[in-house]
Image (cartoon, rainbow, N blue to C red):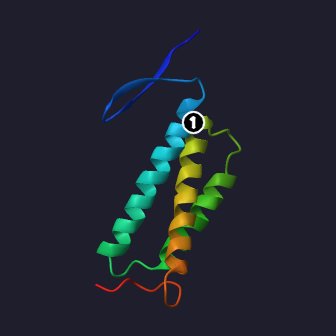
Amino acid sequence: MAAFFFGTKEGVYPMTSTGWTQTTYDEAFESTLASLRKRRLDDPGFTAADARGILRHLYVQEGNDQGGRGGYQDAMLSGMIHAHERFLSEWDGEAGSPGTRPEG
């Protein structure tokens, strides 16, 4: 039986033969969500409409899989899509009208 390993800042750990999919998804989700949150704070011109436009593009990319993207790219794309959806849900759920900026 083949052994699979994944690395983190803390070290290298054994992984099941399908665990890499969840790890890939989690990494894509967390890094995308962090990037979106940072951009919102740092870029006054970044709007919810901008994030929705990126999300629409990701949906199109998800549908363009005629050649077979493979499990790694599917997991990464799913993580990115879900991060955008979470980000927009958080933004729209804040007090005030959807798409408002936090004070400060």
Residue under the point 48% across and 75% down: 50
Query: As drawn, is 44 to the left or to the right of 2?
Result: left
Residue drawn 61% across the image and 36% down it: 71
Quadrant (top left/top right/bottom left/bottom right) for the N terminus: top right
Q: Residue 47: image x %, image y %?
A: 45, 80
Residue 45 placement: quadrant? bottom left
**Residue 26 against residue 57 in the figure, above or below:** above
Q: Residues within 10 Å of mark 1 (few under 14, many from 20)?
A: some
Q: Is residue 104 left or right of residue 1?
A: left
Q: Which residue is mark 1?
A: 21
Q: Amino acid at mark 1?
A: Thr
Q: Nearer the viewer, residue 41 or 45?
A: 41
Q: Is residue 1 above or below residue 74?
A: above
Q: Position of residue 66 (x, y in %)?
A: 71, 44
Residue occupying image coordinates x 52% and y 59%: 83
Quadrant including the C terminus: bottom left
| Helix, strand or loop under label 1 | helix
Where is residue 84? Give x, y as percent: 53, 64
Vertical comparison of 88 with 79: above or below: below
